[in-house]
Image (tube, rainbow, N blue to C red):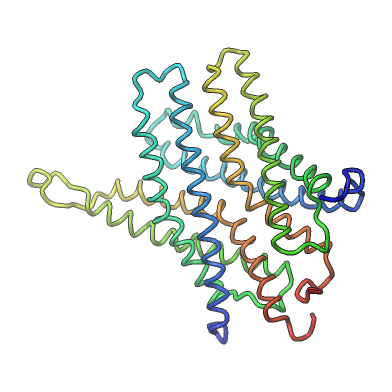
Amino acid sequence: MRLTATGANARTAAVAALLVAGVTIVQAILQSVADALSILVYAASPVAVGYPPGSDAVGSFAATTASLGLAVAPVALGVFLAFWLLVPLTAELHVGRVALRSLVASAVAAAVALAIGAVVAAVDAAATAGPLFGNAFPRPDSSTLFQSLSMTVQSALYTFVAVTPVVILVGVVVWLWVARVSPAPSGA
Amino acid sequence: MAQSLQERATRANARTAGAAAVIVIAVITVQAILRAVIAVFSTLAYSTTEQSYLQNVFAPVAGLGVEFGTTVLPVAIGVFLAFWLLVPLTADLRIAGVAVRSLAAAGIGAALSLVFTAVYSGSSLLFGAQSIGYAVFGTLQSALYTFVGVTPVVLLAGFLAWLWISKPTPAAPAA
C-alpha cells in the first residue's frame, strides 16, 4: 500500500469507479431494451402460441435491477479499491502502463464480484427450505450450493470479459484527465 | 466536417483507422474466444449427470464462426471506414471530440453488423429455418447487443489510436 492511499488517488479512483458504473448501467439499460425485443422475436416465432408477452418485459427489467446489484456495484467497488490502493493512475505513467493497471483493476473488480456473488449464493443455499418438518426449517443444500457457486464463478468470468474494455477505456480517459489537471513534473 | 470526402480520405487517416480497427478486432475476438471457453467449461460442469449436455459441449466453439462473420468482421470494417472516411481521428482533436467520433464509428460498425446479420438471417430464411418476423426482430436485437457490447471497445481503440498519432507526450497537451 505504501504511499498510494492518498486523497488524490482516492479522488481519481472514485472518478474511475463512477465512470465504470455509469457505462455499465447504461449498457445494462440498453441490454434490457434489447431483451424486451425478445417479446417481439418470440411473438413472431412459429412456436409462440398463447405466449404472455408482458411478463417477459417485466422480467427483463427485473433482471436489469438484479444485475445492477450483483454486477455493477461490486465492479465499481473493485475498480475504486484497485485504483486507490493497488494500481493508482498517475500522470507520469505511459499508455501501456495505464492499460496494464486497468487490466489489474478489472481483475480485482471481477474478484470482488465473485466474492459477493459467492456470499449471496451461500446465503441462498442456506435459506433453501429442506424437507425437515414440512420444509419449516432452512437447511443447507450442498448440491444447490455447488450449482450456484459454479454459476457464480461463470458469471464472474463473463463479467471480467465484458468489463475489461470498459475499465481500460475509463483508465485511459481518467489518466488523460489526471495528466491535464496535474501534469507530470518531468515531461517524461 | 468542413472537408470533403476526398480530403479526408488520406493515407494518414487510413493508417490511423487501420490501427483502430486492428485493436477492435483483437479485443472483440479475444472476448468472443474467452466467452466460448467459459461456455464450454460451464457445459462440462453440468454434463457429468446429463448425457444430453455433452452433445452441446462444443456448440459455443462452432458458434464462433458465425459470430466472427456477423459481428467481428462487420464491426471492424465499419470502424475502419468510419475513422478513414467519415470521422477521422486527428491530433488536434480534444478528448470529447475523440469520444464523439468513436461513438459514431461504433454506430457505423453496429449498422454494418446489422446488414451482415440480416444477410445471414435472410439466407437461413431461404431454407425455411425461421419466420420473417423472427428473423427481422432477432436481427435488430443482435445488432443492438453488438452496439452495446462494442461501443466501449471502439471508444478505447479511438483513444489509443488518437494518443498514438498525437504528440509523444500526451500528458502535456498544447492547450
Q: Quadrant of the C terminus of chain B?
A: bottom right
Where residue B98 sits, quadrant-wise, is bottom right
Residue A91: x percent and y percent? Answer: 69, 78
- Looking at the picture, does residue B87 appear above or below residue A3? above
In the image, farthest residue toward the left: A133
Q: Residue at 80%, 55% (x, y): give it.
A: B89
Q: Is residue A16 visible?
A: yes
Residue A19: x percent and y percent? Answer: 55, 63
Q: Is residue A150 visible?
A: no
Residue A124: x percent and y percent? Answer: 28, 52
> Is residue B113 shown left or right of residue B7?
left
In the image, farthest residue toward the front: B2
Viewer-nearest residue: A54 or A96: A54
Q: Residue at 55%, 73% (x, y): give it.
A: A13
Residue A70: x percent and y percent? Answer: 40, 55
Q: Residue at 83%, 63% (x, y): give it.
A: B91
> Is residue A155 shown left or right of residue B122?
left
